[in-house]
Image (cartoon, coloured by chain):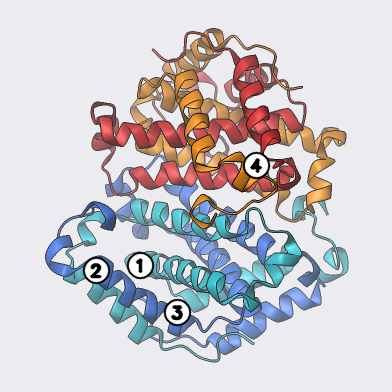
Chain colours: A orange, B red, C cyan, D blue
Amino acid sequence: MGEKKMDLKKINSEIEKFVSDRDWDQFHSVKNLSMALSVESSELLEIFQWLTEEQSNQIKNDPKLMGKVEDEVADVFVYLMRIVNKTNIDLEQAVVRKIKKNAEKYPVEKSRGNAKKYNEL
Amino acid sequence: MGEKKMDLKKINSEIEKFVSDRDWDQFHSVKNLSMALSVESSELLEIFQWLTEEQSNQIKNDPKLMGKVEDEVADVFVYLMRIVNKTNIDLEQAVVRKIKKNAEKYPVEKSRGNAKKYNEL
Amino acid sequence: MGEKKMDLKKINSEIEKFVSDRDWDQFHSVKNLSMALSVESSELLEIFQWLTEEQSNQIKNDPKLMGKVEDEVADVFVYLMRIVNKTNIDLEQAVVRKIKKNAEKYPVEKSRGNAKKYNEL
Amino acid sequence: MGEKKMDLKKINSEIEKFVSDRDWDQFHSVKNLSMALSVESSELLEIFQWLTEEQSNQIKNDPKLMGKVEDEVADVFVYLMRIVNKTNIDLEQAVVRKIKKNAEKYPVEKSRGNAKKYNEL
C-alpha cells in the first residue's frame, strides 16, 4: 500500500546532479521553483479535470493514463525536493509536525465524516 | 543538503491513520486529491508572489516565513503521498524514470545554462 | 444568463486607481501578476475541492458560499485585467481568435459529447 | 491602455454556442470549470516561470511569446465567463464590490509601497 521505503539520499543526489550538469541552479530561485511546482501540480490536475470522481479512482487500471500520472507525480516530487534542499527543510520533521497541527485543527469527534474547513466546524 | 533518509513507511502510516480516524477517505477521490495538491502548491506559491527572486533565496533566514513554507511543503507532500497510495505508484521508480526521460529531452550539451523548453531547443 | 454588458473602461480605471493609490505597480511585474492570478484561481478551486459535481452546480443557491465564489471570481478578473493592461492585449480580439482556434482543434463532428483532448481525438 | 470597451454579450454568446455545438455542458460542472480555470492560469504561469521579472515586463515586445500569452489569457477568460454564466454572477457588481473590500483591507496610508498581506500590516 504505497511506498515501503525510499532512498531519498540517492534520489536527491540524482536530482542535484541533473541540475548541476545543466548549470540550471541559476534559474532555480525558490520563487521560480514554487512556480514550477505549481505548474506541475496543474499538469496532474489537468488529467482529472473532465473525469468523474469514479473514473479518477479507476485510473490505476488504465496503463496509458497512469504513465502520465506517474510522470506528473514525479515532476511534483522533484520540484518539492529542490525547494526542500534549497531551504534546508527537514521534510520528515515538517510532515510529522504538520500532521500533529492538523490533528488539533480537526479533532476526530468534530470532523469525522465531515469535510468542512476547520474554521467552519 | 536536504533529506538524508526518510522513513516513508512510518510517515505513510501516520497519514493513512489521520485520514481513517476522520473517515475522510470518502472525500479523497483521486480527482479531489489532485485539486487539494494544486491548492496547497498555490498556498506555497502565494508566499513568494511579491518577493523578488533574491528575497526568496534568503527566506531560509526568516524563521517566521520558514514556518509557513514548511507547513505548505508538508501539505503538498501529504496529498502527493495520498495520490501515490491510492494509485499504487512506486514513487522511487517513477522519479528515477522521469529523471532519465528529462535527461533525454534536455541533453547536457544543448541545455547547459539555457532554460528554454525542450521543444524550443 | 451571464453578463449583458460591462463597462470595462470604468472597471479598468477603478483597478488602475486602486493600484496607483498604493504605489503597488512596482510589485506588479507580469511574472508576479501571473503568480497572483494562479493563486486566486486556486482559492476558487479550494471552495469546490471536497464538493461533488452536483453540489458544485447547486452552489448558486447557497448565498454564503456564493459570497466567497464572487470574491474569488472578482480577484481572478482583476489580476487578469492587470496582465491585459500591462501587456497591451486586445482582450476581445484575443478571445474571438482563441475560440476560432479551439473550433478547429475540436471539430464538432469529432468532439460532440466527447471530452477527449484534441491530440487524442 | 487596456480594453476600451468589450461586447461581453457577443463574446458570451460565442462561448455558449461553442459549448452547446459540442454538447460539452455535461462536462462543465462548476467544480470541473474551476479545475479548468486553474489549469489555464498555470499554463500562463508556465510561460513566466524561468523569466526574470524584467524579462516578463518586456514580453510585450516578443510577438511569438505574446501569441502564447494571448491564447492563455483568452482561455482563462473563457472559463471564468463559463463559471460566471453558470452561477448567475453579476461580474461588474462583484468586481466593484471586491475592489471596495480590498480598499478597506488595505488602507492607502498603511499599504502605500508595501506588499505585506493585510493581516500583517
Alpha carbon distance from label 2 to label 4: 34 Å
- Residue occupied by mark 3: D94
| SS for callout 3 | helix
Q: Amino acid at mark 2?
A: Val
- Decide: marks 3, 4 in contact (CB < 8 A)? no
Q: Are marks 3 and 4 in one subunit?
A: no
- Residue occupied by mark 4: A44
Choose mark 4 or mark 1, whichever is in front: 4
Name the residue: 50% across, 14% down. A12
- Decide: marks 2, 1 in contact (CB < 8 A)? yes
- Residue occupied by mark 2: C19
The answer for which chain carries disc 3 is: D
Q: Can residue C82 be seen?
A: yes
The answer for which chain carries disc 1 is: C
Q: Position of residue B12 (x, y in %)?
A: 64, 22
Say which quarter of the image contains residue B36: top right
- Decide: marks 2, 4 in contact (CB < 8 A)? no
Choose mark 1 or mark 3, whichever is in front: 3
| SS for callout 2 | helix
Q: Amino acid at mark 1?
A: Arg
